[in-house]
Every structure is written in structure tokens, then in C-alpha cells.
Image: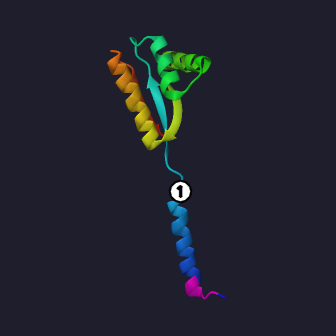
Amino acid sequence: MASMGERRLEGAVLKKVMAENKRPSMYQVLLLNDDYTPMDFVVSILQQFFGKGAEEAVRIMLKVHYKGQAACGVYTREIAETKVMQVMDSARNNKHPLKCVMRKE
């Protein structure tokens, strides 16, 4: 049978293990509307970098167009940062002002 001191130590270890196994923070990746980026480019971005099908990509693009922004997906910080960089690089390379940002959930 464990003594009180051993039980406290076991509880402290258990709390530490539980803290280490905490889920990572998640981030929404958002596209922001502008008046210049072609709609078909936005649809292609959604398909290429976010794996969206044609119908879902069009639906998200229209939400960006009419509401000013729309979420493309929810990811861990590192993946969200990569998605934002991929979109921004592609927009820049194609001379479009499309903006992509991430927001902590």
C-alpha cells in the first residue's frame, strides 16, 4: 500500500503527464475579400492548398466575396502558418492582392 507521500508524488506525476498531453491550439485559416483577385483564382487556391472539391470551393469563394472573409480550414499552428504562406506566395506570384490570415480558435 502506498504512503501519503507516495500518493502525492503519483498525483503530481499524473498532473504533469496530463499537462504534457494537452491538445495543441487550433487556428482558423481565413481568406479575405478584395476587389481585384479573380474568383476562379480563389477557387483554385481552395482546391490546391485546402483540398476542397469544386462545389465547396465555389461556396467558400462566394462567402469570401459576399461576407468579406471565410474560413478555409482549422489546423495546428505550424500547418496553418504553412497554408497562409502558400496562399500568399501563390497570390504574389500571380500578381493578385489576395490576403490569407490565421486566427486562434
> Does 69 sit left or right of 89 as displayed?
right
Q: Main secondary structure of the magenta part?
A: helix
Residue beneath the point at 57% across and 84% down = 6
Which residue shows up at 39% across the image and 24% down it? 99
What span is in magenta? 2-6
Q: Residue at label 1?
A: 22
Residue 96 lies in what quarter of the image?
top left
Name the foreground residue: 96 vs 105.
Answer: 96
Front residue of this view, candidates 43 and 4 = 43
Q: Quarter of the image for the N terminus: give it.
A: bottom right
What amino acid type is highlighted by mark number 1? Lys
Decide if residue 105 is in sight here.
no
Colouring mode (rainbow / by chain / secondary structure / one colour): rainbow
Q: Is residue 105 left or right of residue 95?
A: right
The mark total stands at 1
Q: Residues within 10 Å of mark 1 (few under 14, many from 20)?
A: few
Give the percent coordinates (x, y) of residue 3: 60, 88
Identify the residue shown where x is 57% and y is 75%: 11
- Residue 10 in view of the camera: yes
Residue 69, horizontal then vertical, whole percent: 48, 24
Residue placed at 54% from the left, 16% from the top?
62
In the figure, residue 91 lies in which quadrant? top left
